[in-house]
Image (cartoon, rainbow, N blue to C red):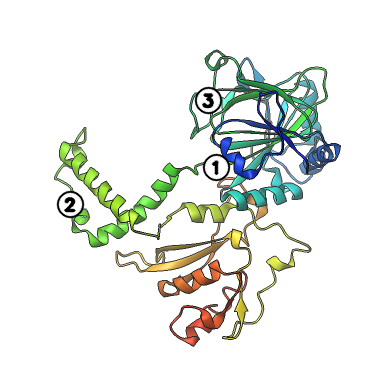
Amino acid sequence: MPKKAKPAGSGKEEGPVPCKQMKEFWEQKPLLIRRDDPALATYYGSLFKLTDLKSLCSRGMYYGRDVNVCRCVNGKKKVLNKDGKAHFLQLRKDFDQKRATIQFHQPQRFKDELWRIQEKLECYFGSLVGSNVYITPAGSQGLPPHYDDVEVFILQLEGEKHWRLYHPTVPLAREYSVEAEERIGRPVHEFMLKPGDLLYFPRGTIHQADTPAGLAHSTHVTISTYQNNSWGDFLLDTISGLVFDTAKEDVELRAGIPRQLLLQVESTTVATRRLSGFLRTLADRLEGTKELLSSDMKKDFIMHRLPPYPAGDGAELSTPGGKLPRLDSVVRLQFKDHIVLTVLPDQDQSDEAQEKMVYIYHSLKNRRETHMMGNEEETESHGLRFPLSHLDALKQIWNSSTISVKDLKLTTDEEREGLDGGNQLSSIC
């Protein structure tokens, strides 16, 4: 697809933007891509439109969970939700008479093309990708100026929308926050988005958008990612495993803290000095290891992401991998982007003598209908467990396009043929 790109608000169009140049914008500054292409505008319009709400409401949509009705009044968000099920005629009435914005949550649960797009983006980013649709009538604004804790991609689907972006007060923010008009100053970027246009801006960017009077309604989809996906989050996720392993070998880490330390109002000099020393020890150990134990982030991502978008009739997601492999068989890994391999203490043991096990989690059985819907229902993890001695063989499969069973790094031929573990690998190999 042809595309013209420019830094937001520069006024000068440039050529296509290669992915490698995106580093200039990612987490740094907004990017506006204008695409004067009728075919692309038609495609964008097919992703979601106002009239889609009628068929969606007939499937049982609820206020709060699936749809919000709101309007910006005097710099504040006014929620106009009713109770219970959302009915299209009521939504349309609030839209027309109260000039309310209709916000539809996570439309990828119902719109196949958004499922396809967001599933590919989750593979690309290695992070959850959510979306919300905003439908705003002419002469109205749905939300006050605010910033988000996610990287934002705006796709303009129907009509036109007037956008204003402001310098962040909290760069790369970790939370959502509304900002007062008098605090944010003048916009640093201001423009109209038309169907087919795409706008990116980093988390923390203050923004507001309205549909000008005299125009048709506006529909856009906000695709977002990288929530709680920073180096700080990764450090918190891996540090517990690093401490656990180091304490097994370092008696100083196993020594008790000073008497009544927990009763102190402020940290003592001794405690601060000891903790600083332990952190240096951990840093030294980290320099020499290749195995970072992710306690939650990997599993959380794979448990909550979209399942693969089916190619063709989708039979490959439900058909077993076939016969058990023999020594002369050649195996390969399917759906690699939907699998994580990690080493964790055996979760079936609760004592301190937990052995490490290899866990392979996958998203092949995840439910599209619950994607990004929070704790609406308990999410089940789908995965396989292997002894730590199988790690090298599993890495061979992971790192090879195809590999012969007889070449797997296991002790015996029986182990090589039995790696499938009773057909447990058949869904991904």
**Dot 1: what SS?**
loop
Residue for point 56% across, 48% down = 127
N-terminal label among 1 and 3 = 3
Q: Is residue 409 above or below residue 230?
A: below
Q: In the rendered structure, which amino acid carries the disc numbered 3?
A: Pro
Q: Is residue 102 left or right of residue 36?
A: left
- What is the residue that sits farthest to the top in this orientation? 182
Q: Is residue 8 above or below residue 321?
A: above
**Dot 3: what SS?**
loop
Q: Residues within 10 Å of mark 1 (few under 14, many from 20)?
A: some
Q: Position of residue 308 (x, y in %)?
A: 67, 58
Numbered label attached to residue 256: 2
Mark 3 vs mark 2: give the one in front: 3
Numbered label attached to residue 168: 3
Q: Is residue 184 above or below residue 29?
A: above
Q: Nearer the viewer, residue 200 or 339?
A: 200
Residue for point 66% across, 24% down = 10
Residue 378 seen in render: no
Q: Is residue 233 above or below residue 291?
A: above
Q: Residues within 10 Å of mark 2 (few under 14, many from 20)?
A: few
N-terminal label among 3 and 2 = 3
Badge 1 is on which residue? 226
- What is the residue that sits farthest to the left in this orientation? 259
State which quarter of the image contains the N terminus: top right
Q: Position of residue 331 (x, y in %)?
A: 61, 76
